[in-house]
Each structure stands twice: as structure tokens, then as C-alpha cells.
Amino acid sequence: MLALPLLLLLAAEPVAPPPAATNEPRAPVFATSGFTRPAEARKGCVARHIRLPVDMAGSSGSVTVKFAVELDGSVSRFEPLSDAPDRVAAAIWEGVKGCKFTPGRDPKGAPLAVWMILPLRFQPDAPPTPSTPTASGTPPREAEPGCIRKQLHYRFPPNRLLRGLLVIRVAVAADGKQGAIELPPDLPDDVANAFKLSIEGCSYRPATSAGGQAVAGTFEYRVSFAEPGEAERAAEATRLKRQAKLASTTCLQRLRSFGVIGHAVVQVRVTADGEPTNFRLQPDNVPAEMRLHIFDVLATCKWVPAIGLDDKPVDADTVVTIRYR
């Protein structure tokens, strides 16, 4: 430590001291235009490595998390961006740590620490109960539980926003053959077609009588759609002078085309400091790459926090409609 002052005294001109050494890693950045995003070395690795607690194994819903992928592909700074029980967040973090990642790169190709935003969907192993068994026997059911849900995952149009409960009825004969399909009226043609093809792509077991004999019956499939945050926003409206919002919509121009036409609604929790978090998107079957890109763009936008009745910034939810083409 004494060598540096002696060198300064002998120098002909003042020399600026070198910057203080630090072990702190460089803060991760968001992958904006020109950057290469980090990625799983094996696609789907995190989803395969998540092990939920036994009592939560049938949970359903969406969780979005953020974590940094460092220069060497290691991970750090894990943070859930949507509401999730602590045990679920811990299970996701363990899954993340069990995978390998390729690091992000700047526009010049140099590796650097980059935030990775990862949306995850949890679905129960079994589909919604189609109908309730009666004292006289059991109703028709899918031969493969969850078949319709799996079929819909690939066929449901990603640009449709629906609300409310839909009930689809299918006539199932005593030999298990399906008959007429009854769909709710006024469904868009592409949605109705997606349901019809999904139902026709599955096989069924017939209803049974009280004596165990196969009989004809009606299979019911129920699915519910709701706009994210509708109830929360209505409750918050009574305590806010100003809603949270985007500082400018120009940042949305960075959304790229995915070959589909439509729109999606994203609920965002904006903190009192103007930081976006807790992203939720409807419809929830938007392709994973599109969902990731939407969240990534919104995370880099500037936000104006909500103002409470006491004229101070507060945490609050807001909604952004994303139109893509």
C-alpha cells in the first residue's frame, strides 16, 4: 500500500489512481435490439426439472420468473415476476439451477450477463371434471384423461380473447362412439373449429348404469376464460387518483411479427418506483416464444407509477393491449 504514494511523488505529472478493484459482478442487462438472448442449452430443461411439493403437484396456473445468465452460463439473481407461493418459487429456482444455459451476447458478439425472462405454465394431470357421477351410474368420460386439453393446446387460435364459462356437450353411444357435438352459440368460427377438431381427435368411454352396464350418455367439457386482473383493477380504482401506465407506447414498436394476427392483454404490476413486475397474459395459450418476447419488451419499457389518494406513488396493476401481426 506504500508503493503507490511514492510513485506519485516521483512522477513528472499527476497520475490518476487506478479504479478500485471490486469483486462485484457486472449488473445484468436486458437483451434489447441487436443482443443475443440467453437460452436453455436443452429446450424445455427447466420445465422438466421442476419438482413441485407433493401436495401441490396438481396445481395449475402461470408463473413468470426472471434470473440472470452470467458470462459462463451460470445463473443468479432469481426473482418471480408473478404471484407464486414461496415453495413453488423455490421449486422453480431448483429447476433453473439444474439446467445449463448459453450466455447472452452484446451486438458485437461478446458474452455478458443478461436477464432471462421465463414464463411457465402449470397444468393439472387430469382435465376439469366433465360432469358429476350420479347415484344411477357414471357419466361418459375421456378414454385418455386430458386428451381434449392437449389437443386444444395446439389448435386454439392464439389471437382470441374469450370471457366466461364455455360448456361443450358430446353425445357418446353405448359402444363409446361419439355423436353430435353441441357448441355454445356465437363462437368465432376458428374457435368452434378448434373445439370440434379437438373433441373429434379423442376417444371416449361410455356412461354406465347403476348395474355397471354401458349406456349412451352426454359428455360435458367445461372451460373458463377471464381477463387477467379484472377484479383487482376494479378494487384498486377506489384508492387511486391516477392509474399506472406506460410512459410512452413507442417501446412497443420493438414487438416483432410472429406470423399471426390478433391481440393479447397483459396485466402488469408497476411498483411505486416505476418498475414493471408480475406479468400475466390472456389468452394464456400464446406461443411461448411470443409470450417471452412480449414480456421482454415490456420489462425494458419505462412506466409511470400510479398515484394514491394521498398523492404519493403506490404499487398498482395496469393493463396493456398488445396487437401483433
Image (tube, helix red, strand yellow):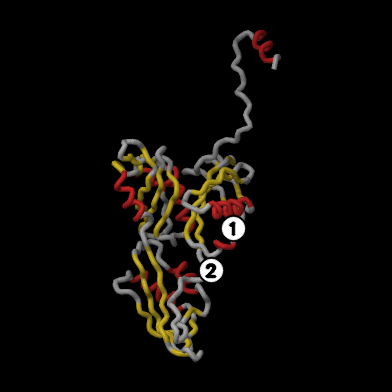
**Which type of secondary structure does the marked residue at label 1 adopt?**
loop
Closest to the observer: 71 or 126? 126
Identity of the residue drawn at 52% across and 52% down: 118
Q: Residues within 10 Å of mark 1 (few under 14, many from 20)?
A: some
The residue indicated by pointer 1 is: 50
Location of residue 43 in the rendering, given as x and y in whole percent from the top left corner: 58, 57
Identity of the residue drawn at 38% across and 64% down: 225
**Can residue 246 be seen?**
yes
Q: Is residue 229 left or right of residue 204?
A: left
Q: Residues within 10 Å of mark 2 (few under 14, many from 20)?
A: few
Identity of the residue drawn at 40% across and 85% down: 179
Q: Is residue 196 left or right of residue 22?
A: left
Q: Amino acid at mark 2?
A: Asp
Which of the two discs, 2 and 1, labels the residue nearer the N terminus?
A: 1
Closest to the observer: 92 or 191? 92
Q: Is residue 75 left or right of residue 161?
A: right
Count the marks. 2
**Can residue 323 be seen?**
no
Q: Would you place residue 14 above or below residue 62 in this image?
A: above
Location of residue 302 in the rendering, given as x and y in whole percent from the top left corner: 39, 40
Location of residue 178 in the rendering, given as x and y in whole percent from the top left corner: 43, 84
The residue indicated by pointer 2 is: 125
**Which type of secondary structure does the marked residue at label 2 adopt?**
loop
Residue 112 image-quadrant placement: top right
Closest to the observer: 250 or 210? 210
Position of the C terminus by quadrant = bottom left
Identity of the residue drawn at 42% across and 46% down: 298
Q: Amino acid at mark 1?
A: Ile
**Cα distance in 3D space between marks 2 and 1:** 15 Å
